[in-house]
Amino acid sequence: MAHIGMDLNRFILEEERKHPNATGSLSLALTAVETATKIIASHVGKAGLANVLGRAGGVNVQGEEVQKLDVLSNEIMIQHLSDSGQFYALASEELEEPIFPENGKDGRYVIAFDPLDGSSNIDVNVSIGTIFSIHKKITGTVEDFLQEGYKQVAAGYVLYGSSTMLVYSTGNGVNGFTLDPSVGLFLLSHPDIKIPERGKIYSLNEGNYLKWDEKLKQYINALKEKGSSSRYIGSMVADVHRTLIKGGFFAYPADEKNKNGKLRLLYEVAPMSFLVEHADGKATTGKEDTLKIKPESLHQRVPIFLGSKANIEEILSSLN
């Protein structure tokens, strides 16, 4: 039985033992993610002292300004995930095309990741994170990344905040681990996370209010009249983490500027939806279940509303 304080590696092995036919490959894959994010956490913790703050002087495939810590985090993820030998292919939000590492030619999985979510907040010391999504290798081509979200074998995030937390699911509950820097271990701190059925906190960028459709404007205005609280950090990892713990909902809807939404299906929406739904929450684009969407491209964007089941059902009723 899992207990508070159990270290992540032991927890992963205990979960593996529940599946007699397991090869251990997924356990090693998750351990590679753990190692990479520990190193990123170390760099984040001393960002202001190590000349990794500020812009790197370019833009990524999304057309966004690249931060120095973005580049470093991406390199760390690629190196450790490739060296693990568990991943046949890697897709990063920062790169236009996937990588097929030599060490992973016998790998059973492909992984998509956002190496540093919320990087525009780096210079002001606000919480940021890493998001990952793991699928089985099926064809050995880029098509392996274009699987529906419900087919993920594991998904999670690491939050670099007042403490560093790793939250993940393999489809059997959602568990959170806090990094104890004194021993260098992620220790179980939030077992079997369940999102509250309903919450009073809503989280979305109200700076885009004038670009929203009228039904969404009316819904948000109604929430304000009911006394709901607005909390928006601007790092998806941090906003979703609060939503998982406190309830309510997080959203990045479509608007006049971003007709198809702004967040990426593979790197952000699908893994976060997987976590929320396995914590008894709900995720939708406003039209369809996000985990049922068949991706059309590596960098596809979609609208997202996710959080407490009652809140999301209320949103769907208001918007449709």
Image: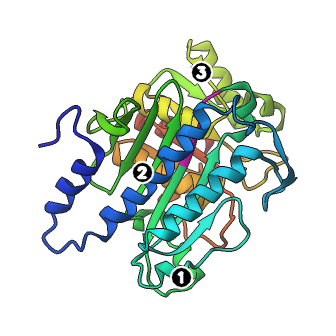
* Alpha carbons under labels 1 and 2: distance apart: 21 Å
Q: Give amino acid for label 2.
A: Glu
Q: What residue is drawn where x is 38% and y is 58%?
A: 30
Q: How would you rate the neighbour count of disc 1 (Cα within 10 Å): few for under 14, some for 14-19, many for 20 or more?
A: some
Q: What residue is drawn where x is 75% and y is 37%?
A: 51
- The disc at residue 34 is 2
87 displayed left or right of 5: right
Q: Could one spot residue 121 in this view of the protein? A: no
Q: Which residue is mark 1?
A: 102
Chain-order first, disc 3 or disc 2: 2
At which x and y percent is residue 226? 56, 14
Give the residues in magenta: 126-130
At which x and y percent is residue 170? 33, 57
Q: Secondary structure at mark 1?
A: helix
Say if mark 3 contacts mark 2, CB within 8 Å.
Answer: no
Q: Secondary structure at mark 2?
A: helix
Q: Secondary structure at mark 3?
A: helix
At which x and y percent is residue 66? 79, 49
Q: Give amino acid for label 1.
A: Glu
* Alpha carbons under labels 3 and 2: distance apart: 39 Å
* Mark 3 or mark 2, whichever is nearer to me: 2
Q: Which residue is mark 3?
A: 223
The coloring applied to the image is: rainbow
Q: What residue is drawn where x is 59% and y is 48%?
A: 286
Foreground residue, 206 or 191? 191
At which x and y percent is residue 7? 26, 41
Vertical order, 33 against 281 (above or below): below
